[in-house]
Image: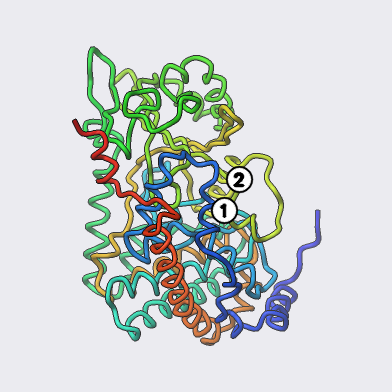
Amino acid sequence: MADVQTLTERQAAGRHARQHAKRSLHAKTGNIDRDPVQLLKENSKGRVEALVPLRYGRMSVSPFTFYRGSAIIQAHDLAGTVNSGITFPICGDAHLMNFGGFATPERQLVFDLNDFDETATGPWEWDVKRLAASFAIAGEHMGFNRGAISEIITAAMHEYRDRMCNYAGCSALELWHEIVTFERMTEAAVTAEGRQLISKTMEKAAGRTHESMLGKMAVLTDGRWTIQDAPPALFHPGGPNSLLGRDQRWSNTEEWKGKLAASFDRYIQTLSSERRKLIAQYALHDIAFKVVGVGSVGTFCLVMLFIDSHDKPLFLQVKEARRSVIAQFFQGDEPTHQGERVVSGQRLLQAASDSFLGWSTGPAERQFYFRQLRDMKVSAEVERMSSTILKGYGRICGWALARAHAKASGRAVEIAAYLGNGNRFADALTQYAFGYAEQNQKDYDAFIRACRSGKLEARSDEDMAADFRV
């Protein structure tokens, strides 16, 4: 085993990193000499061709939705910025909408990062910068003034700094067991409005179960549940509403029961033995293609509906795992399986992960990861927040990100020493956030011009749904 450094040595290493990566230099936006439209086109290669216009349609709604779907652009830009040299598996897409609440296997409601499609080894600062910029872009989209937005970003950055300082005093096991529960969030809330919102979110989460989703998504006919098509967002791969080409209709239910059973069996083997016994109590009833989010649109994403002997459902989501945009612009260890990369990153960064989290390989060597579709999962309704509430939400995100980084890296001491106790890093990140919000607006304008000129095709959900109406 390697020698363990003393706390003094680790603190010195963190402070030493300031010599080659001054904290003030984090204000720089990076390498912005590129064509954002070309980067998006490259990122769309290999996706379901008929769904790429929907991806662009969802991105076109606002500069904020554009930002959510364009992680590849910021990853490119961040490659041109300084970093502390402290690297480990980061989230890779830590914008403010990729945090949320969900239930642990022990049925405890927690708040954490919840999207790991882009997880990869990278500088921890990249996660913090994507989070900071998302608050600037969202704040401007919501019409907040610059002073209010600055307070929101600063609050998030200070929370990250302060929590990291606290985590620097924790043992390895204490960090591994640290968890941000909704009860702790309520205690940390500084306003009655914030506490009330957390309480309402807890009530909402309690109703977001597999059972509540069954009646909304599926119908029972002759003892078998069938997912109802709602194209373009939900359809059967081999059905009349499919948006997949003939060679991509392998993902229908009968195929999974036949030649794709081996792929599902490989997924089962990535689960712990007790989870394998649990899922064995369910029978597969149906499979559908489900379009999710903004950045994931066009990648393969399936929903598998299982039913047990008590007629209770289990919905599993099967998501395609492609190469991380972080890995494209930061050299780290290349994984042998992209699905395993996502699962490993999620297990490492989250305080508690999905019981059914696993991975497998499907036809055409597409790589996937599996998880529950819904298990008390809730996301923040950011656009309905006041600046005060968004500021409180920023603190919670800063807290959750610091916890994730401290656990995943085992380098809380070094990061805390690098950050220090002052405002230099927060001030630099606030400047970066505003600068990147301005750049994001320029990229969004170029994107909209490309859509209007026909260089890119963008279609809304409503527009595509009309294609299926009789």
What's the coloring here? rainbow
119 over 466 or under it: above or below: below
| Quarter of the rendering containing residue 372 | top left
The numbered disc on residue 422 is: none
Q: As rendered, which of 192 and 133 lies closer to the eye?
A: 133
Cβ–Cβ under 8 Å for marks 1 and 2? yes
| Quarter of the rendering containing residue 424 | bottom right
Where is residue 44? Give x, y as percent: 51, 48
Q: As rendered, which of 74 and 355 lies closer to the eye?
A: 74
96 over 212 or under it: above or below: below
Give the amino acid at mark 1: Thr
Q: Residue furthest left?
A: 470
Where is residue 436? Give x, y as percent: 48, 75
- The residue at which mark 1 appears reads as 119
Where is residue 421? Give x, y as percent: 55, 84
| Quarter of the rendering containing residue 92 | bottom right
Query: Looking at the image, which residue is at 44% across and 79% down?
Result: 434
Give the amino acid at mark 2: Arg
Query: Looking at the image, which residue is at 57% across and 80% down?
Result: 28
- The residue at which mark 2 appears reads as 341
